[in-house]
Image (spheres, grey):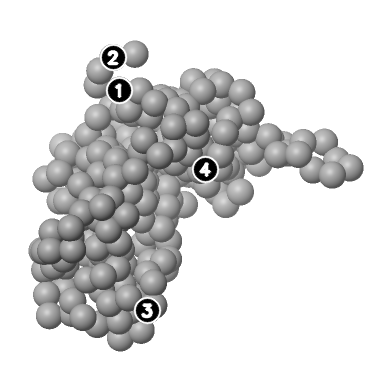
């Protein structure tokens, strides 16, 4: 394993026991690697195992077989080691309604035992960075959906994570707001150098964001992989789009 590898899935499978029925296999012999600073998109239909893969990566599930290695450690057995090193942005903002915007952003810093002065200073700077200066003391119910998601992004970056996991974070937003936040997310990843895994079911979002796209079929395994670069011409990008559509339009695997 080279030093540049941040994430390794090595022949990973995950099955769930079902009473009176055969086990359900959500992930099958899945292998891929992610280099430090890379943004990798996991794209697939609903039910293809994207979220199970996400939970294996974040240490919430143990593989049935194979191994997951993140920064040289096992995220399941060494879960506490990853505190402050991995941040997650979910589809819903998951803000605490009883905490103001600044206190929501400061939550991870608080859990990491930062002083109150330090965490409030960092939280305020991230809110300002994401266009929420002046809203530090607003509660979530007073913020729009896009503003709440900005708070959740600020919360994720405030702990200075090495790895950012994104689980369809913009799917509930309107197109204009979603596009603006995608652009901001890309800029933040470039500036911080964080490694990112981004789950989506949107082909256009994948093409807009990713340096590499992994298309999953069920049970989670890679059916197609494409590398992108900013200098790709439209014909090449359309070719990738057509390939993804072909894969996703194929028969659903058993």
Report the mark closest to the observer, 1 or 3.
3
Vertical placement of 238 versus 36: above or below? below
Circles 1 and 3: CB atoms closer than 8 Å: no
Q: Quadrant of the N terminus?
A: top left
In the displayed image of the protein, which residue is found farthest to the bottom?
142
Circles 1 and 2: CB atoms closer than 8 Å: yes
| Disc 1/disc 3 C-alpha distance (Å) | 40 Å
- Location of mark 3 (residue): 98
Please report the residue visible at 44 percent of the width from the left and 38 percent of the height from the top: 79
- Location of mark 4 (residue): 60
| Disc 1/disc 4 C-alpha distance (Å) | 21 Å
Q: Residues within 10 Å of mark 1 (few under 14, many from 20)?
A: some
Please report the residue visible at 48 percent of the width from the left and 39 percent of the height from the top: 59
Report the mark closest to the observer, 4 or 2.
4
Q: Earlier in the sequence, mark 4 or mark 2?
A: 2
What kind of element bears circle 3? loop
Q: Residues within 10 Å of mark 3 (few under 14, many from 20)?
A: few
Please report the residue visible at 18 percent of the width from the left and 58 percent of the height from the top: 115
Image location of residue 189, percent across then percent down: 19, 46
| Disc 4/disc 3 C-alpha distance (Å) | 26 Å
Q: Earlier in the sequence, mark 2 or mark 3?
A: 2
- Location of mark 2 (residue): 2
Image location of residue 234, percent across then percent down: 24, 43
- Say which of 87 and 167 sits in front: 87
Image location of residue 15, percent across then percent down: 68, 34
| Disc 2/disc 3 C-alpha distance (Å) | 45 Å
Give the number of the disc on residue 5: 1
What kind of element bears circle 1? strand
Q: Earlier in the sequence, mark 1 or mark 3?
A: 1
Circles 1 and 4: CB atoms closer than 8 Å: no
In the displayed image of the protein, which residue is found farthest to the right?
20
Q: Quadrant of the C terminus?
A: top right
């Amino acid at each position: 394993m080279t030093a540049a590898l941040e994430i390794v899935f090595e022949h990973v499978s995950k099955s769930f026991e079902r009473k009176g029925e055969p086990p359900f296999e959500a992930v099958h012999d899945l292998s891929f690697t992610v280099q430090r600073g890379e943004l990798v998109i996991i794209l697939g239909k609903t039910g293809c195992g994207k979220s199970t893969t996400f939970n294996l990566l974040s240490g919430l599930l143990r593989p049935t077989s194979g191994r997951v290695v993140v920064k040289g450690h096992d995220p399941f057995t060494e879960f506490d080691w990853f505190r402050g090193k991995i941040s997650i942005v979910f589809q819903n903002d998951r803000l605490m309604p009883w905490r103001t915007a600044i206190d929501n952003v400061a939550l991870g810093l608080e859990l990491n035992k930062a002083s109150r002065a330090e965490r409030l200073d960092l939280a305020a700077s991230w809110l300002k960075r994401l266009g929420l200066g002046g809203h530090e003391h607003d509660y979530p119910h007073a913020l729009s959906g896009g503003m709440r998601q900005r708070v959740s992004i600020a919360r994720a970056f405030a702990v200075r994570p090495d790895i950012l996991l994104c689980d369809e974070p913009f799917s509930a937003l309107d197109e204009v707001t979603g596009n603006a936040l995608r652009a901001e997310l890309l800029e933040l990843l470039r500036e911080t150098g964080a490694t990112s895994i981004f789950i989506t079911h949107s082909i256009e979002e994948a093409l807009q964001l990713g340096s590499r796209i992994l298309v999953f079929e069920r049970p989670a395994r890679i059916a197609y992989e494409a590398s992108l670069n900013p200098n790709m011409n439209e014909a090449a990008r359309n070719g990738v789009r057509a390939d993804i559509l072909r894969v996703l339009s194929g028969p659903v695997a058993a």
